[in-house]
Amino acid sequence: MALAVCALFDRRGERAIRELWGRLEAAGVPTLLSLTHGRHRAHLSYAVALAWDLGRVTDAVTALPTGGPFTIAFHGTLLFPRGRAALAASIPADVAARQERVARAVAGAGALVHHHYEPGQWVPHVSVATRVKRAQLPVVARLVHDVLPLSVEVTGAALIDSGTGEAWPIPGIP
């Protein structure tokens, strides 16, 4: 699958996103709760690697300076190809610079970075639904609208294998 460098939320933020996933699932819309291993965490991905050496990526990412916690505000919904719906993230300007540093570090470690996470291509988002059918879009829009606006605090980071859900915490927040 993929290895993602993830910014992780505080308990309140994690709970808010998971509750939204639960409401979507109850309405018949697949989310990360029911995707693959079911161990997904709410997160903002800085970079996603399609091929990687875990040790090299870990060394590269942990060598980056920590930027500390930050707040993400959500005011809308994004739709991506292949049925993915997400919360559109409003981020501080320095977080975009952090993402570029992380993507460059991951690529510098020899990993193949997914093209949507290459510097200048990143669209900050938090996934809320997967494999959404066209007929389900009004349901997704209504349920997301019910929780907006929403702000969450990023308080941690980890490398996460999307295929297994296994996570390796990163000291600090790159």
Image: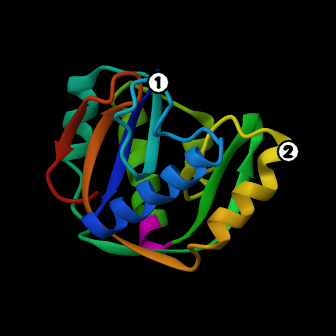
Give the residue displayed 46% in from the left and 54% down from the top.
100
Give the residue displayed 74% in from the left and 51% down from the top.
79
* Image position of 25 with respect to 138: above or below: above
Main SS of the magenta part reads: helix
Mark 1 and mark 2 lie on one chain; the one further toward the N terminus is 1
Please, what is the three-letter code of the amino acid marked with disc 2? Ala
From which residue to which does the magenta span run? 91-95
Residue bearing mark 2: 135
Give the residue displayed 57% in from the left and 44% down from the top.
25
Residue 110, percent across and down? 38, 24
Q: Quadrant of residue 52?
A: top left
Which label sits on residue 56? none
CA gap, disc 1 and disc 2? 23 Å
Please, what is the three-letter code of the amino acid marked with disc 1? Thr
Give the residue displayed 55% in from the left and 50% down from the top.
127
> In this rendering, would 123 be left or right of 47?
right
> In this rendering, would 102 be left or right of 121?
left
Q: Are marks 1 and 2 in contact (CB under 8 Å)?
A: no
The single residue placed furthest to the right in the displayed view is 135
Residue 38, percent across and down? 40, 31
Residue 150, percent across and down? 50, 76
* Image position of 13 with respect to 29: above or below: below
